[in-house]
Amino acid sequence: AAAAPAGCSGLPNMLLRARALASPTDYWDVTASVGHTVDDADNFLDGTYESTFKTERNSLSLQNDLYILDNQVTTLGADFQRDLVSGSTSYVEDSRDNTGVFAQHRAEFGRHTVQLSGRVDENEQFGGYLTGGAAYGYRITENLRATASYGTAFKAPSFNELYYPGFGNEDLDPEQSETAEIGLAATVGGFELGANLFHTEIDDLISYDSTIFAPANVDKARITGLELTASGEVAGFLVSAAATFLDPVNASGG
């Protein structure tokens, strides 16, 4: 959820999650999860109550992992999400559902790993979207692996971004993006080291606009970045570290 502007107080955000796993057969794992989040706030100006704003999100997911072939796994699943908004103001859209179905297949052939995925979302407020991705990995040596991937994504603006009093923007459109990435992962002296270079092109990036004091869409944006990671055991402790270097660019032109 988007951060509340200054001058807001209320109940702390609440987040509840539960997950259950089962294995009906040796070749089939099932994961079910549910979630509930609440952002409830009373808004004050100079100590005087002005409004109440509350958003809720309920989610349900079911995932099936099938191990039918050696060194391969097929994942099939669906999820459902309902967003609700209420408060002192009446909204044109005070609830919306998002239903998604997804599939993924991952296979290892000797030194090679291939992964393909696809997802269809039907959002009650913004319509239908098809996204997916492909990834390839090659084990150069026992301790060195190279990867390459490409994927697309869709992100609807939250009800907080759309409607929060004094902050939201009802004219926001969903983000749509595509990302290409290459990486290297190595095991050195018991440490896992990684370096990933990525490039993302985003249409309608949702970003805070200081000229209107609200989130707005950036027509086109590009983000190029490098992520470095390291993890391992030191003196009996598991430690990890990461650093990300980003070069974001507003590519809208005009």
Image (cartoon, helix red, strand yellow):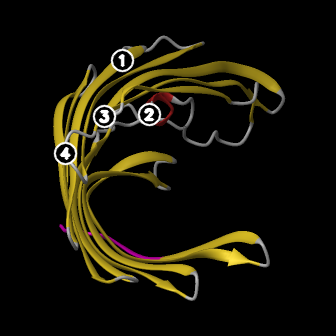
Secondary structure at badge 2 equals loop
Residue under label 1:
96
Choose top left, top right, bottom left or bottom right for residue 223: bottom left
Question: Which mark is first along the chain, 1 or 3?
Answer: 3
Closer to the camera: disc 3 or disc 2?
3
As measured in the structure, the alpha-carbon distance from the residue carrying label 2 to the one carrying label 4 is: 40 Å
Tell me which secondary structure the magenta stretch mostly adopts.
strand
- Observer able to see residue 122: yes
Quarter of the image containing the N terminus? Answer: top right
* The label number, if any, that marks residue 27 in the structure image: 3
Task: For label 3, count other residues whose C-alpha is less than 10 Å away and answer few (under 14), some (14-19) or many (20+).
Answer: few
Q: Position of residue 12 (x, y in %)?
A: 75, 30
Secondary structure at badge 1 equals strand
The residues colored magenta run 245-254
Q: Position of residue 91 (x, y in %)?
A: 43, 14
Task: For label 4, count other residues whose C-alpha is less than 10 Å away and answer few (under 14), some (14-19) or many (20+).
Answer: few
- Where is 69 relative to 99, above or below? below
As measured in the structure, the alpha-carbon distance from the residue carrying label 1 to the one carrying label 2 is: 11 Å
Amino acid type at circle 1 is Arg
Q: Position of residue 112 (x, y in %)?
A: 20, 70
As measured in the structure, the alpha-carbon distance from the residue carrying label 3 to the one carrying label 1 is: 36 Å
Residue under label 2:
158
Residue lying at 56% horizontally and 34% vertically, measured from the top left: 166
Residue 15 is covered by the magenta coloring: no
Question: Which mark is first along the chain, 4 or 2?
Answer: 4
Question: Which mark is first along the chain, 2 or 1?
Answer: 1
Amino acid type at circle 4 is Leu
- Observer able to see residue 252: no
As measured in the structure, the alpha-carbon distance from the residue carrying label 3 to the one carrying label 2 is: 38 Å
Closer to the camera: disc 1 or disc 4?
4
Q: Nearer the viewer, residue 57 or 187?
A: 187
